[in-house]
Image (cartoon, rainbow, N blue to C red):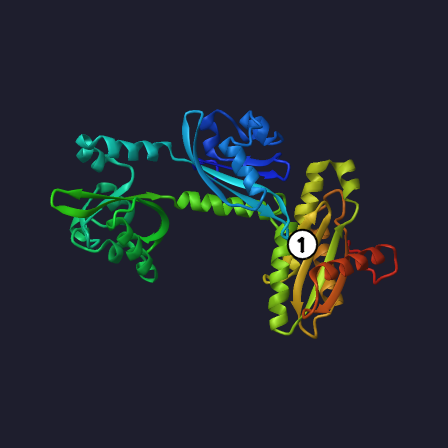
Amino acid sequence: MLESVPVNLWSTDAHLNITFSQGAGLHLIGTSASEQVGMTLYEVLKTRDPGFTPLAAHLRALQGELVRYETDWRGRSFETRVEPVRAADGKITGTVGIAIDVTDRKSLYEALQTQNVYFATLFESAPEAIAILDERDHIIRINGQFTTMFGYTEFDAIGRSINDLIVPKEMVEEGEKLTARAVAGENLRAEALRRHKDGHTLWVAIAATPFGVADQPGRVYAMYHDISARKHAEDEMKALLLADQLTGLPNRRAFITLSEQALKLATRQERDVLMIFIDVDHLKQINDTHGHLVGDRALMDTARVLRESCREADLIARLGGDEFVALMTVDSDQTAELVCDRIKSRVIKHNREIDRGYELSLSLGAKRSKAEGTMLADLLAQADTALYEQKRGRGRPHALSR
């Protein structure tokens, strides 16, 4: 998805070192992700001027602001949003940005504004869906792309309220307010969900321009640009920032956020929680003996073993390196030993499936606690302590292999 949408996505750390860069829009400005990752933002922008708009936006994001701006760079026009990335404690640890290439859309909009003589041709050939509305929000005219985007023909649409036609029922009031603002003379820009004739919804960017014709003021020229792919790309970007790239499990940042929510839910339900800290034993030896690709496979196998050993509602994450963690709510008859034994059985089955040249071995430390009044950091620390006590031979042996 990210490689097929004209969008640039990136993230930086608190020192503006670029930690992630991806998107089909990169080639449009003559660069690539491999060139950018590892560079500083100053190197990419070729300036340290804090007044330079893109750099200023990142500096403001590091102060906690969400910044939106438009800029022209290397012959392309971009709508850009930069916002802070926060750790679980609220501390800002970097920035994340998304830039949408709007060159074509901007060019079309300017052409429609300045070349009215070509209106009819542009109206019918425009890549955006277009509807002309009267002062009551009733449709006067639509173009072919409107039919393509929303499924309504001219026969279906003309004379009907735009809000009754394409706005989801639960959002009609919002749609009516937007239309009223445009009729009142506001050049409107918005992003919203709209409804196709067959019932499915799509995200659109709306550009509404009021205009008057002779003695008929209050007309609105409304353009709709399908941004569903961009919205999906933004969701994918968020998922990339919250997921471990190797195993697909939540990463440490996601685990902290989701665990806090899980503890609150378990508290309301008056249930106990169980935290299990998991280490992959001898991972360095596997890497040194068999290579890092095999080591990576061991980590992916560990993630699969844990998924198959736990319930769908249980939270499993990779904290980093050889460390995994699982958090689950438990009933009175679910002991830590029972859960650990279930993982042990799955590890044994895994090792018997095929000779991989090594045996997957896991060490576990478990801590059960009432959810009410329990701090996540304390629960993690106690499970971690149990793990290392087990490794030193002072706890119940949960080193899992064949």
Tell whether 62 sits left or right of 194. right
Can residue 10 be seen here? The reply is: no
Q: Nearer the viewer, residue 251 or 159?
A: 159
- In percent of width and height, residue 213 lies at 14, 42
Q: Position of residue 239 (x, y in %)?
A: 54, 48
Instruction: Categorize mark 1 by other alpha carbons within 10 Å: few (<14), some (14-19), many (20+).
Output: some
Q: Amino acid at mark 1?
A: Val
The residue under label 1 is 305
Confirm whether residue 210 shows in the render.
Answer: yes
- Compared across the picture, whether 395 is left or right of 43 comes to right
Q: Nearer the viewer, residue 373 or 230?
A: 373
Q: Could you say where residue 355 lies in the image, as x and y percent from the top left?
A: 72, 45
* Image-quadrant location for residue 339: bottom right
Which residue does the image show at 78% across and 41% down from the upper left? 284
Residue at (29, 35) in percent of width and height: 109
Q: Residue at x 68, y 41 (%)?
A: 296
Q: Is residue 196 left or right of residue 62?
A: left
- SS at circle 1: helix
